Amino acid sequence: MNLRETISWIKAKIQSDLFPHLKENFTDPITEKQKKLIMILEMVEIEKHVKSPEYQWMGRKLKDRYAIARAFVAKAVYNYGTTGALIEELKSMSNLGRICGFESKSCVVTRESYLAGGKLLRIVKKKSSFPSESTFSRAFKEFAESELGDQVHKALVGENLSDQIIGHISRDATAIVGNEKPAKRDKRAEGKEEIKADPPKRGRPKKGENRADKKEDKRLNRQVNQTPAEALKDIPTVCNVGSKTNAQGYKETWIGYKFHVDTNDCGLPITTVLTSASLHDSQVAIPMMKMTTDRVTYLYDLMDSAYDAKPIHEVSKALGHVPIIDRNPRRGDALPMSPAEALRYNERTAAERFNSRLKGEFGGETVMVRGHKKVKLHLMFGVIALFADHLLRLIT
C-alpha cells in the first residue's frame, strides 16, 4: 500500500467510524475546523511520545499530560497567540476540550476536618478539574526538555516517507522573531570570522620545540568528517540579532532565531534546525544533509547562492546526491545552469510556501516563549500540525 492509499484509508476510517461516534456524544455540532483538528491529531498521535515523569507521587495524573500535548497541537492548528487564549477556548468550546482529551471543566469539591481549640472545624475547598495556565507551562517545559516535537516529527517522516523515493530536497532558512533580549554577538561562533593563529616567533626554534601551525580549520571543513550531532554542538543557538537582504534589495534586521528546514518536492518538512539569527545559512547545510539522508532517500539538493561552498558541494556528491546550487556572484562570473537544472531549481518555491504557511497559519509568528528549547518546541508543534495537514491535502 503506497502513501496515498494509506492516508486515504486513515481518512475514510476516521470519517466512517470516529465522526459518527463523536456526533452522538457531543452536545454541539462538530465544525469543519474541529474535523480538521481531529484528523491531524489522529495522524500525529502525539500522546504515544509523551513520557511519564520519573517521580509523580503527587499532582495531576499523567493523562492530563496527554491532553495538554494534544492541546498544544490544537493551539498551532487554530493559530492562537498565547497559551492563555488557548485555555479560554478550551473552557468555552466544549467540543474542543473533549477533542483534546479534557473530560470536564467542573469543580472538584473536597472537605477537610481538623481540631482547633477543642472544636471540630470543617472546610470545604473547591478546585477546578481543568489544568491551570501554570500547569500548561510546566508541561511545556517538560516537553521541551524531552524534545517531544522532534521525536514526533521524526516518527511522522519515518512512517510516511522512509520508503519513498524523493526527487529533491529544498534547503532554506527563515527569520523567527523572538521575545527576549539578544545576546552579545560572537562572530567567531557564527563562522563569519576566521580564527587567526598567533604570530610566529622570530628566530630558530629551540631544541624540542614544535611550532606547528595553530590555525583552526573552518567550520565547514570540520563538518565534513563530523556526525550531525557533533556538528550541531558547535552551532550557536542563543537569541541574537540577524540581518538579510530581501527580494527588493533592502537590508532587514530582526531579534530572535533562524529556522532551517529541508523540504521535499511535495512541500513536507523532513529536517529542521533552530539556530541563532546571525548564523550564516551555509553553516548547517552539511549536518542537515546528513540527517535528511538518514531519514529519506532523495536525489537532488536544491540550495540558493548562500550555500555555494566547496565542502557543501563535495558532501552532497559523497552522499550520492546531485547538488544544484545557485552560483554566488562573489565567486566570479555566474555559470548558467542547464535547462533541466534550472527547471528543477525553480521548484525551491516549495520551501518558501512552507515557511509562509508555518508563519501565517501555524504559529510561526507568535513566539512568546523564551529560550532555544522552548522556541524550538513551539515551532515544532506547528511543523507536525502542518505536516499532517499537508498530507491530507495531497490526497484530496
Image (cartoon, rainbow, N blue to C red):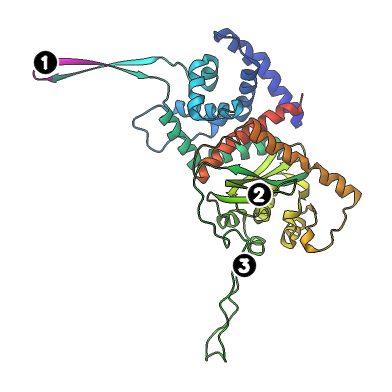
Give the residue at x 60% y 78%: 213
Residue 103 appearing in the image: yes
Disc 1 from disc 3: Cα separation: 78 Å
Q: Position of residue 89 (x, y in %)?
A: 52, 20
Q: Nearer the viewer, residue 167 or 74?
A: 74
Q: Residue at x 71, y 42 (%)?
A: 263
Q: Give residue 194's mark.
A: 3
Marks 1/3 in contact by CB < 8 Å: the verdict is no
Q: Position of residue 145 (x, y in %)?
A: 48, 42
Kindly check if marks 1 and 2 are in contact, taking CB atoms under 8 A apart as contact. Answer: no
Splitting the image into 4 quarters, where does residue 20 fall?
top right
The amino acid beneath tag 3 is Glu
Query: In the drawing, does residue 132 fall left or right of residue 109?
Result: right
Q: CA distance from mark 1 to mark 2?
A: 69 Å
The residue lying toward the viewer, choosing from 107 and 370, is 370
In the image as oriented, which residue stretches furthest toward the left? Answer: 118
Q: Quadrant of residue 122?
A: top left
Q: Earlier in the sequence, mark 2 or mark 3?
A: 3
Could you tell which of marks 1 and 3 lies nearer the N-terminus? 1
Give the residues drawn in magenta, as a range: 116-124
Left or right side of 147 for 14: right
Furthest residue in direction right, as rendered:
339
Location of residue 204 with respect to 125 vertically, above or below: below
- Numbered badge on residue 119: 1
For the stretch drawn in magenta, what is the main secondary structure? strand
| Residue 193 placement, left or right of 180 | right
Residue 121 is inside the magenta segment: yes
**63 falls in the magenta region:** no
Question: Residue 43, percent across and down?
Answer: 63, 28
Amino acid bearing label 2: Met
Res 146 seen here: no
| Residue assigned mark 2 | 291
